[in-house]
Image (cartoon, helix red, strand yellow):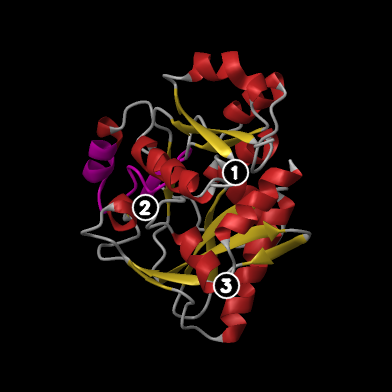
């Protein structure tokens, strides 16, 4: 009998369109099962009504509403098996302050929070660098806050350096780190446009052209935070490395982008792995 998989996407944040693109890309991989796409919140009631018809659910909502544990709580309530991390992992990882505090307890360095300018402001709960900005003055910060009412912002010391990201993926009984990617943004940092606008995409060097010792340390830290937070199946951690090779952990993504321009598919391909086979393995194990 053919498995039936519900793919949940959409959401109500600035990451909605990216989530839908990720979900559509994932649908193409799952040709070994019957997939049904539900766009939340519009299709929430329909999914709940027919939830028992599905063998598993795949949440592909980036940011609040998908990566914060609420959707996973719904799956638990409906007794629908699901991919990726459980409620508590998402709830912690979505909060950049909590995640940084936890990282520091296991010896991983993060940027210090500050109110002195210049500073880097970013939503405390969110992803895809939506509404993130390097602010040189109080006026710039005030304008950002005014344009993003209701958003809780985190303000950090701006760290100058090279940007890297590391994926961690579970493949069968193994939890492995994927090739390190260096991100060379076209602007001041790796923002939303650099990630998803085809005309402004950042340069992504995969694998990163760096010393093996730096590669190993970035992978070690990504694996450590993945395991410490009890992330499941997949995560991607972002870092900045200064000129003197000091590594700063920025955040962990527990449902990273899976669009045709996203980094995880590129990492998996570079590692000579099949994303389709990996996703199939995840589905079969839940």
Out of 98 and 196, give the one closest to the viewer.
196
- Per the rendered image, the range of residues in magenta is 121-144
Residue that appears at 64% across and 59% down: 169
Where is mark 1, residue-wise? 93
Residue 69 visible within the image: yes
- Mark 2 and mark 3: span between their CA atoms? 33 Å
What is the spatial separation of the Cα atoms under label 1 and label 3, in whole angstroms? Answer: 26 Å
Residue 115 higher or lower than 264, as above or below:
above
Give coordinates of residue 273: x percent, y percent.
59, 67
Mark 3, other Cα within 10 Å: few <14 / some 14–19 / many ≥20: some
Tell me, yes or no, whether the two marked residues, 1 and 3, touch with CB atoms within 8 Å: no
Q: State yes or no: residue 202 in magenta.
A: no
Q: Nearer the viewer, residue 247 or 164?
A: 164
Q: Is 93 left, or right, of 175 in this rendering?
A: left
Residue at 45% from the left image edge and 40% from the top image edge? 126
Determine which residue is flagged by label 2: 120
The answer to whether marks 2 and 3 mark residues whose Cβ atoms lie closer than 8 Å is no
Q: Earlier in the sequence, mark 2 or mark 3?
A: 2
- Give the left or right position of residue 193, taking residue 277 as reference: left
Q: Position of residue 214 (x, y in %)?
A: 57, 79
């Amino acid at each position: 009998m053919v498995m039936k998989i519900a793919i949940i996407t959409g959401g109500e944040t600035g990451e909605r369109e990216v989530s839908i693109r990720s979900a559509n890309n994932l649908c193409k991989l799952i040709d070994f099962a019957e997939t049904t796409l539900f766009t939340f919140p519009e299709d929430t009631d329909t999914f709940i009504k027919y939830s028992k018809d599905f063998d598993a659910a795949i949440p592909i909502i980036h940011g609040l509403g998908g990566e914060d544990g609420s959707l996973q709580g719904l799956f638990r309530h409906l007794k629908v098996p699901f991919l990726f991390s459980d409620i508590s992992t998402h709830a912690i990882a979505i909060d950049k302050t909590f995640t940084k505090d936890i990282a520091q307890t296991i010896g991983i360095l993060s940027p210090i929070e500050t109110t002195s300018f210049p500073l880097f402001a970013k939503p405390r709960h969110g992803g895809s660098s939506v509404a993130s900005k390097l602010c040189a003055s109080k006026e710039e910060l005030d304008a950002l806050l005014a344009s993003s009412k209701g958003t809780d912002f985190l303000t950090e010391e701006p760290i100058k350096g090279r940007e890297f990201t590391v994926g961690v993926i579970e493949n069968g009984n193994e939890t492995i780190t994927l090739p390190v990617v260096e991100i060379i943004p076209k602007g001041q940092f790796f923002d939303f446009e650099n990630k998803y606008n085809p005309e402004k995409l950042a340069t992504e060097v995969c694998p990163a052209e760096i010393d093996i010792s730096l590669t190993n340390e970035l992978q070690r830290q990504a694996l450590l935070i993945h395991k410490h937070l009890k992330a499941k199946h997949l995560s991607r951690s972002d870092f900045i490395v200064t000129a003197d090779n000091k590594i700063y952990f920025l955040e962990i993504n527990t449902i990273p982008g899976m669009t045709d321009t996203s980094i995880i598919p590129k990492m998996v391909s570079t590692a000579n792995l099949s994303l389709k086979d990996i996703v199939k393995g995840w589905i079969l194990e839940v």
